[in-house]
Image (tube, rainbow, N blue to C red):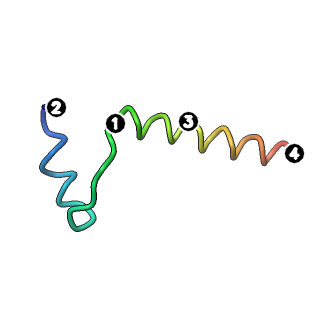
Amino acid sequence: KSAGFGSPASSFGGGATVPEPGTLGLLLVGALGMLNRRRRA
């Protein structure tokens, strides 16, 4: 599949399932948006 994403990521967290880089990016953008909204309010 994707080169280099499987083995080091799977050992991180004791074999916890790590989301795809794209999914992780979307979650990060969403979290930053919520933080900015909370900061303005």
**What whole-number distance in Å separates the C-alpha atoms at marks 3 and 4?**
18 Å
Mark positioned earlier in the residue sequence (2 or 1): 2
**What whole-number distance in Å separates the C-alpha atoms at marks 2 and 4?**
40 Å
Residue found at x 22% / y 68%: 14
Say which mark, if any, is on residue 29.
Answer: 3
Along the line of sight, which residue is nearer the eye, 4 or 27? 27
Residue found at x 24% / y 60%: 12
Q: Residues within 10 Å of mark 2 (few under 14, many from 20)?
A: few
Along the line of sight, which residue is nearer the eye, 39 or 34? 34
Say which mark, if any, is on residue 41.
Answer: 4
Task: Where is residue 20? Give x, y as percent.
Answer: 32, 38
- Looking at the image, is 2 positioned above or below residue 27? above
Mark positioned earlier in the residue sequence (3 or 1): 1
**Is residue 38 shown left or right of residue 10?**
right
Residue found at x 50% / y 41%: 27
Disc 3 residue type (three-letter): Val
Q: Nearer the viewer, mark 2 or mark 4?
A: 2
Mark positioned earlier in the residue sequence (3 or 4): 3
Answer whether labels 2 and 1 touch (C-beta < 8 Å).
yes
Tell me the SS state at disc 4. Answer: loop
- Looking at the image, is 8 positioned above or below residue 1? below
Quarter where residue 32 is shown: top right
Say which mark, if any, is on residue 21.
Answer: 1
- What residue did someone put label 2 on? 2
**Is residue 36 shown left or right of residue 9?**
right
Mark positioned earlier in the residue sequence (4 or 1): 1
**What whole-number distance in Å separates the C-alpha atoms at marks 2 and 3?**
22 Å
Tell me the SS state at disc 1. Answer: helix
